[in-house]
Image (tube, rainbow, N blue to C red):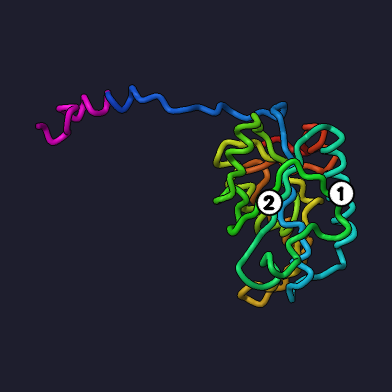
Amino acid sequence: MSAFGPYGTLAAMLKGLRSITLPQRGLPKMSDPAALLVIDAQESFRHRPYFRADELDAYMSRQQALIDGAQAAGLPVIQIFHVEDTGPFSEASGFVTALDPLRVEASAVFRKRRHSALVGTGLDVWLTSHGIRRIIVSGIRTEQCCETTTRHASDLGYAVDYVTEATLTFPMTDRTGRDWSAADIRARTELVLDGRFARIASVAEALSGRASRQAA
């Protein structure tokens, strides 16, 4: 048998590969059916040393408005919880519940153990089976699980509206000693996502299907 197996020659092998038909999802559009992801908006964060409540009320107001608007528009609301074996993110802690006083009537609930809500959860299968090609991202933390899920979803072929104003994060200090405020982190996240992995949208824009700026 040839070194190239049953194809006989390299040219024949390449011809065989060209004949393989791969499934195509097609390019997502803003008019595609959408779902709202509420990522890690859970009580666990109150029990982390970095938690700050100074921006909590503003976040909760916008997050609730986004949830209520999605439900009123008939969009599925997907609740994501992060779980770990120990600590405040463990099921045994009792803190893996919606961040009080957030009200969520979820169409589906998924639990994740990685930063992306699309790793090991079955979320991609659920979205695909429901014909959903566009997701609206919200939750906690802006630059961590929300951003990671956005990048992953974009690579999987979803159109993503990233609603920065309905995300929450906390100040950080980098390895050089520079302090980053929550506003700094939000601005940095918008910079690296906008036009490459997502459309940055307000609550109203995400619910209407319009975005503040179009992807390049």
Of all residues, the one furthest to the left in this rendering is: 1
Amino acid type, residue under disc 1 in the picture? Gln
Residue ID at (79%, 69%): 46
Which residue is tagged 2? Answer: 191
Residue ID at (61%, 32%): 129
Q: Distance between the residues labelled 2 and 1?
A: 25 Å
Mark 1 falls on what kind of element? helix
Which residue is tagged 1? Answer: 64
Sequence-first tag of 2 and 1: 1
In the picture, the disc for residue 168 is: none
Q: Foreground residue, 147 or 174? A: 147
Q: Is residue 182 left or right of residue 68?
A: left
Residue ID at (66%, 32%): 132
Q: Is residue 81 above or below residue 203?
A: below
Mark 2 falls on what kind of element? helix
14 within the magenta span: yes
Q: Position of residue 5 (x, y in %)?
A: 16, 33
Part of the protein shown in magenta: 1-15
Amino acid type, residue under disc 2 in the picture? Leu
- The label nearer to you, 2 versus 1, is 1
Residue ID at (67%, 28%): 29
Residue 75 quadrant: top right
Q: Position of residue 169 (x, y in %)?
A: 75, 62
Q: Quadrant of the C terminus?
A: top right
Q: How crowded is mark 2: few (under 14 residues within 10 Å), some or many (20 or more)?
A: few
